[in-house]
Every structure is written in C-alpha cells, then in structure tokens.
Amino acid sequence: MLDSYRGKTVLVTGHTGFKGSWLSIWLNTLGARVVGLSNNVPTTPSNFEASQVAEIVDDRRLDVRDAESVQRVFDEVNPDYVFHLAAQALVRKSYAAPLETFAINGMGTANVLEAIRVLNRPVTVVMITSDKVYDNVDWVWGYRETDRIGGKDPYSGSKGVAELVIRSYLASFFSAALPVRLGVVRAGNVIGGGDWAADRVVPDCIRAWSLQRTVEIRNPHATRPWQHVLEPLSGYLALGAELSERGVCHGQAYNFGPSGSQNHSVGRLIEAMSQLWKGVTWADVSTHQHVHEASLLKLNCDKALAELAWKPAMRFDETIRFTVDWYKAYYEQGTSTMREFTRAQIAEYTELANRRGIAWAQNR
C-alpha cells in the first residue's frame, strides 16, 4: 500500500516538528521526494536537527499565516500529496499566546486549503488536527468521529476552528467530482524519540534526566492512551494511500490511537521509562495550581479499522522501549547516527506490523 508514495512529490507542512520530522524521514525511506514547509525549528534539540532531516528534504522556510508565500510554494512544487501538520501544538502555550494559536491553527489551515483550491490539479491531502477537537466531558469511552467538536482551552478551540475551515472547503470547493481528495486525521498523546517540546511529560523527563535532575510532574494521575509516534503516522500514510488509490474515504475523518490496554497514568508511564533509564527520580507537584488539562481523553478507532484496515501495532512496553532507546542513543552517540537509528526504528516498527497482520505493512 505504501508503495503509492514512491517517486511522488509530497509536501509536508510542519516538517521541522516532532511528528513532521518523523513523517519526512519515513516518506524519504519510501522513495518520495519530500518538500518541507515550516517557519522554524521549534525546539533545540530537535529530531529535525538530530536526524539531519534538512539533508533529505527540500527545506522551505515560511509561515503558514503568509497566504501569498504558501500559494507560491504550492504553485512551484505541484505536490501529489500534502500532509498538513504545521501548528501551534502546545496547550499551555495557547494560554499565553491565544491569538497566535488561533491564527496559526485556524488561518494557517485556511491558507493551505486555499493554495490547494487555486492549484486546481489532482492532489491527495491529509489534514492533521488533534484528539482535542472533541468536546471533552471526561467520559470513560472513546470519542467517535461523529461526536461533538468543542474546546475548553485556546489550543483545543483553535483545532476546532481548523476542523470547521476544513468542512467549509470540503462542502464548497472539494466535491467528489473535483481532483482534490482529502481526509482528516485526529490523534493525541504521541510519544517517541526526538520530542523536546515544552510542558510534555516525556520531554520534561528526558531534559531533567539527561542532566541527572529530578523531574517535577504536575499531573501524575492523569490517564492517557499513550502511543508511539509511528502509530498515528502509519495511519496518516495508510489514509493518504487509500485516498490516492480509490478515493472512497474522501471527506472523512479518522481517529488513530492505541488499544484500550495502553490507557495508563502519567505516573505509570514515568515508572516504565525509569526502568530503562536507571538512577532517575521524579516528584509529584500536583498540589500546585496549573491551567486546565483534561484528566481523561481517549479515541474510538473502530472506523479506521473498518474502512482502512488500520490498527495499532505496538504494545505499551514496546512503545516505552522505542522511546527511551532513541533518547539514550542520542545522548550517548550524538547526531552522527540518529537518522539511521530513526530509519531502523521505522523498519522495526514496520516488521512488527507485518508480523501482526496489519494490512498497510503486508502490502508495502
């Protein structure tokens, strides 16, 4: 299935970010020509720099809020596929910079869709939003794609805005008779090597532990369905291939998340990581005052299984091992080997999926 990308031009917005850099490496491994569009590298360190992604992509720097520049790149590149990941992706930062968050996630999405509309050529589009688009009422079952969109914080609200923009373009400009085939994907609680974003539990741990310091955890009892970054990316790629080959998923949204057995507390996640990174410590600071964060959020992924034959490939222990092994390799070996290490993890993940009978890996 993923052979669909070989020899194709794929434009990835947000390619310097955590998920975007992993996706760019995977697409390059699949034989695609990858064009990346981003305004900067969001963190130092980063997977983008550690894995030297700029050496294997056409690295373009611009802000998705700049509609003219976005249109110019699309006109020049003429992509076969577009994966839109560029975003302000941090909940806590959205409280400090709500207007920036709404502008990037709302108008940035509109600018990308407008560039695609004006391009007026066959193109397959995967729009990445978030699990946090759902109106989270802290119920115990997973949210379905048809559940209500909401958002109690600026980040969640901005992703809801992005979804409304996408729906408007679908209804107004991207009917099934036109050359654009578009799908929407929602995922969250993604971990893996190369993430150094602020106020995320795994990067917080890694930053502290790499300096032999105690990490402070603000919400150790919060429960999350943790998944390795390769899990949702495999879903994004599977959806893109399906849209390109058959188009029956056009206009549909899909959740990508782990099985219910991977619904673990933050404290359990840290304990599992600490078993592989010896001599580390952490402290519970949950009595301190923090901004609102949902205590429970998980997705129902039955639709992805039924329509894309997609399901998660990794167990919780494998998710933790992949994540910790990547960071240990980085801190022990530096950047000279990290791209190949990342490729090796992609290959191992693909083999896991193949052995467990998952369609995209068997038909690659």
Image (cartoon, rainbow, N blue to C red):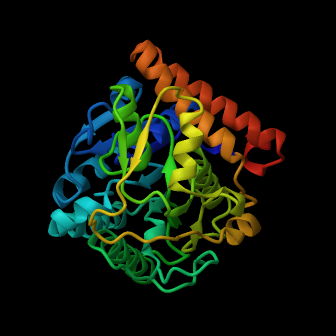
Asked if residue 342 shows in the view, the reply is no
Left or right side of 288 for 344: right
Left or right side of 4 for 331: left
**Position of 163 relative to 44 (above/below):** below
Residue at point 70%, 63% (across, down): 260
Give the number of marks.
0
Residue placed most toward the observer, 104 or 28 = 104
- Extreme residue toward the bottom, this view: 148
Q: Quadrant of residue 302?
A: bottom right
- Whole-percent x, y for residue 105 in the image: 29, 65
Asked if residue 86 shows in the view, the reply is yes
- Whole-percent x, y for residue 149 in the image: 44, 82
Q: Quadrant of residue 273?
A: top right
Q: Quadrant of the C terminus?
A: top right
Left or right side of 320 for 209: left
**Position of 66 relative to 164 (above/below):** above
Q: In which quarter of the image is residue 271?
A: top right
**Position of 51 relative to 289 (above/below):** above
Residue at point 68%, 41% (across, down): 317
- Whole-percent x, y for residue 110 in the image: 29, 69
Residue at point 69%, 53% (across, down): 312
Residue placed most toward the observer, 320 or 304 = 320
**Position of 209 relative to 261 (above/below):** above
- Whole-percent x, y for residue 214 in the image: 36, 37
Residue at point 27%, 61% (across, down): 92
